Image: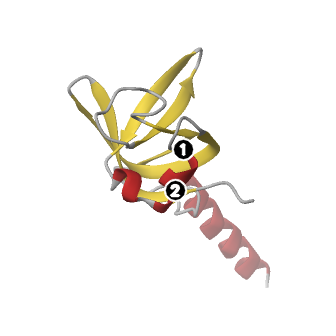
Amino acid sequence: MIRTMIGAAAAAAVVVLLGGPTAAQPPAGEVKLTGDLVCGRCSLKETPKCSNALQVKDGAKTVNYFLADKGNGEPYHEGVCGGDKVANVTVTGKVSEKDGKKWLTPSKVELPKK
């Protein structure tokens, strides 16, 4: 009985030390960012068409991540078009940089619960 308990405790310690999988971690190569979702055209005036952008606080500055998605064709765009924003949006995806802008290709977009 004691050997079983010691063995189980040792196995649990190995999983913790080796960084076993957890539900909160994004898949390899992806990041999970939380911020305000805004329209790249209406709010930021940085894209020619309506698009989605996630504004994330990095210390004292705000970093804009433009979402490489369907723009105004996404169901969550309705809440941001016209200059509005949706706070506490979490986006999981891959970050890249193009023409001096940060782009985020989302694999998951989580809106705050109402």
Compare residues 94 and 21 and report the one nearer the observer: 94
Q: Is residue 112 visible?
A: yes
Looking at the image, the residue that sits furthest to the right is: 1
Quarter of the image that includes the C terminus: bottom right
Q: Is residue 3 above or below residue 50?
A: below
Q: Position of residue 10 (x, y in %)?
A: 64, 66
- Residue 105, horizontal then vertical, whole percent: 33, 50
Report the amino acid beneath label 1.
Val
For residue 18, say whether it is visible: no
Q: Residue furthest left?
A: 99
Q: Which residue is mark 2?
A: 76
Observer-nearest residue: 18 or 10? 18
Task: Tell me what residue is drawn at x 61 percent, y 55 percent.
Answer: 111
* Label 1: element kind: loop
Q: Amino acid at mark 2?
A: Tyr
Residue 86, compared with residue 58, is above or below; it is below
Res 80 label: 1
Relative vertical location of residue 71 with respect to residue 7 in this rendering, above or below: above
Q: Are marks 1 and 2 in contact (CB under 8 Å)?
A: yes
